[in-house]
């Protein structure tokens, strides 16, 4: 079974802090994704990566950056957290094909005070 | 860009009853995914449909993609409390990227 894990289920940070969200997958998938999920807005893609050290902006990249130094790990970075970044963050991975299924982690609920 | 609209937004049914959730696209679908999400958790992959007229089943859940490939339905037969959660449809928008519907919140009353 595909396993996607996220470093924290719940996280509380203060405005202005630098926040790291980590995602690890164990299926040697090429593609990895970061989404945020908000009531009424659904899932929105922040960034994705199709290879090590490669990244592409999604629909809402502002205020975020990412890092993919190893194939299995994809990090989402909030350089200076703000209250409007309070959200549920979901990581996903998929094989290299354009229409391959994405498998999701359990999510990290981030609260920025 | 492609948009997916799900209906209804929420659904409350009596245990044992059948139900249907719909997902409609503004464009032709080239890969339609159904996921389930328990409240506060990640998404669990249910099924993927690609061909017009395709139908897949998993336990008591059946998903169909219409011939024109612009609408999909998810049907649950004899609903159980374990079916409760949020159901999301997703479709490919360009290479690798998925766009999602708003989700349908399903509540099963005993």
Image (cartoon, coloured by chain):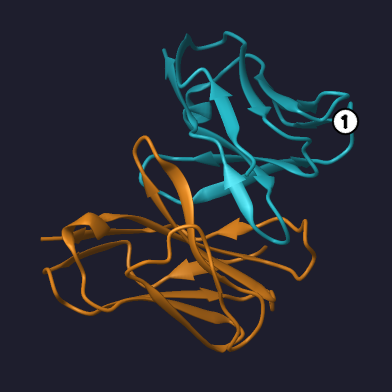
Q: Quadrant of residue B50?
A: top right
Q: Residue at x 38, y 40 (%)?
A: B39
Classify B64 as above or below A8: above
Classify B61 as above or below A39: above
Residue at the spot of label 1: B54
Q: Residue at x 66, y 26 (%)?
A: B24
> Which sits in the foreground, B88 or A56?
A56
Residue B96 coordinates in the image, percent (x, y): 70, 61
Classify A54 as above or below A61: below
Label 1 marks a residue whose chain is: B
> Which chain is painted in cyan?
B
Classify B28 as above or below A22: above
Callout 1: few (<14), some (14-19), or many (20+) C-alpha neighbours within 10 Å?
Answer: some
- From the image, which quarter does the N terminus of chain A lie in? bottom right
- From the image, which quarter does the C terminus of chain A lie in? bottom left
Residue B103 coordinates in the image, percent (x, y): 49, 32
Colour of chain A, in one word, is orange
Q: Residue at x 77, y 61 (%)?
A: A98
Q: Quadrant of residue B35?
A: top right
Residue B76 coordinates in the image, percent (x, y): 64, 20
Q: Residue at x 58, y 89 (%)?
A: A53
> Which sits in the foreground, B45 or B53?
B53
Number of marks drawn: 1
> Which sits in the foreground, A1 or A31?
A31
Which element carries disc 1, helix, strand or loop?
A: loop
**Is residue B65 left or right of B75 when viewed as pictured?**
right
Residue B15 coordinates in the image, percent (x, y): 50, 12
**Is residue A64 left or right of A100 when viewed as pictured?**
left
């Amino acid at each position: 079974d595909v396993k996607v894990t996220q470093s924290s289920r719940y996280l509380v940070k203060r405005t202005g802090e630098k926040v790291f969200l980590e995602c690890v997958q164990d299926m040697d998938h090429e593609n990895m994704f970061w989404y945020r999920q908000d009531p009424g807005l659904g899932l929105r893609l922040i960034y994705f990566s199709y290879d090590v050290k490669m990244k592409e902006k999604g629909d809402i990249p502002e205020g975020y950056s990412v890092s993919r130094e190893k194939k299995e790990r994809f990090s989402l970075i909030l350089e200076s957290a703000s209250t409007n970044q309070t959200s549920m963050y979901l990581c996903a991975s998929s094989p290299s094909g354009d229409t391959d299924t994405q498998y999701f982690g359990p999510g990290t609920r981030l609260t920025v005070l | 860009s492609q948009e997916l609209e799900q209906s209804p937004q929420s659904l409350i049914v009596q245990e044992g009853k059948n139900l249907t959730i719909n997902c409609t696209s503004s464009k032709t679908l080239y890969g339609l995914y159904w996921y389930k999400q328990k409240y506060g958790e990640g998404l669990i992959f249910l099924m993927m449909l690609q061909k017009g007229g395709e139908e897949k089943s998993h336990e008591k859940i059946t998903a169909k993609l219409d011939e024109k490939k612009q609408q999909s339905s998810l049907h649950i037969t004899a609903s159980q409390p374990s079916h409760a959660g949020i159901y999301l449809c997703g479709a490919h928008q360009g290479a690798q990227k998925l766009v999602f519907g708003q989700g349908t919140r399903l509540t099963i009353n005993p």
